[in-house]
């Protein structure tokens, strides 16, 4: 069974275990196994053990689904950003979702005569994305819900049906020679009948 590592700040919610169960149920409904960072994590686990556990789970997963909803500020959770980068470096497909539908520039700053600026006067990236371009490069879909991101991941793992024409057996050499001969005879007959009278 294909598996998805479920990255995001959901582990910090007051209902973190319930949220994890919900995300894993969404995966199961699509025939996937959800790997939630709090699964099998004893409460006394130290920082380095947590980090190594998450890395091992990303390595074991077939893809990563990440919640990039702004967390403790205008941007996404930094730990989740690291996990996205790690998964991409390992060649894993990454699917993003955010409950905040605003574009990054509007979320962080205000339009000025010299582009978008934050409250401190610093330039705000304005490439029309919902998060920093290193997280969501141009053309990246940021889904509006975990359901949509998980569905996209499930679609990736569905076996592709061949085109109906590919169901037919390929023509053999003798069949191709026969077809070519029939075309040549027909062309000769038509030429003699109409052109060389």
Image: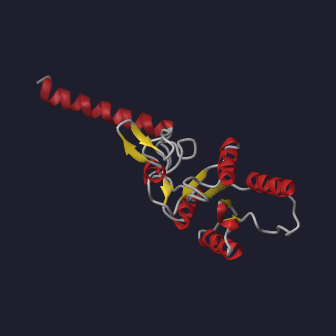
The answer to which of 143 and 42 lies nearer the viewer is 42
Which residue, as the protein is rendered here, is positioned at the far left?
Answer: 197
Which quarter of the figure has residue 26?
A: bottom right
The answer to which of 23 and 165 lies nearer the viewer is 23
Q: Residue at x 72, y 56 (%)?
A: 61
Residue 15: x, y in percent? 67, 76
Residue 158: x, y in percent? 57, 59
Q: How is the image coloured?
A: secondary structure
Which residue, as the protein is rendered here, is positioned at the far front?
Answer: 120
> Is the N terminus in the top left, top right, bottom left or bottom right quadrant?
bottom right
Q: Residue at x 71, y 74 (%)?
A: 17
Q: Residue at x 13, y 29 (%)?
A: 194
> Is the C terminus in the top left, top right, bottom left or bottom right quadrant?
top left
The answer to which of 115 and 90 lies nearer the viewer is 115
Residue 44 located left or right of residue 191: right
Total numbered badges shown on the rendered structure? 0
The answer to which of 69 and 52 lies nearer the viewer is 69
Residue 191 located left or right of residue 126: left
Q: Residue at x 58, y 56 (%)?
A: 73
In this rendering, the answer to whether 175 lies above or below 49 is: above
Residue 15 located left or right of residue 167: right
Residue 107: x, y in percent? 46, 53
In this rendering, the answer to whether 64 lies above or below 20 is: above
Residue 76: x, y in percent? 59, 54
């Amino acid at each position: 069974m294909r598996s998805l590592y479920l990255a995001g700040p959901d582990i910090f919610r007051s209902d973190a275990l319930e949220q994890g169960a919900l995300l894993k149920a969404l995966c199961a409904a699509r025939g996937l196994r959800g790997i939630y960072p709090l699964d099998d994590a004893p409460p006394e686990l130290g920082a380095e053990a947590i980090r190594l556990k998450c890395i091992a789970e990303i390595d074991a997963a077939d893809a990563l689904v990440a919640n990039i909803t702004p967390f403790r500020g205008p941007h996404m959770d930094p730990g989740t950003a690291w996990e996205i980068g790690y998964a991409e470096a390992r060649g894993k497909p990454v699917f993003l979702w955010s409950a905040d539908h605003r574009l990054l520039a509007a979320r962080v700053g205000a339009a000025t005569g010299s582009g978008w600026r934050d409250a401190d006067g610093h330039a705000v990236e304005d490439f029309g994305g919902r998060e920093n371009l290193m997280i969501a490069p141009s053309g990246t879909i940021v889904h509006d819900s975990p359901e949509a991101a998980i569905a996209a991941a499930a679609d990736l793992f569905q076996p592709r049906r061949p085109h109906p024409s590919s169901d037919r057996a390929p023509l053999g050499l003798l069949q191709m020679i026969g077809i070519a001969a029939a075309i040549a005879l027909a062309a000769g007959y038509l030429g003699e009948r109409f052109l060389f009278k």
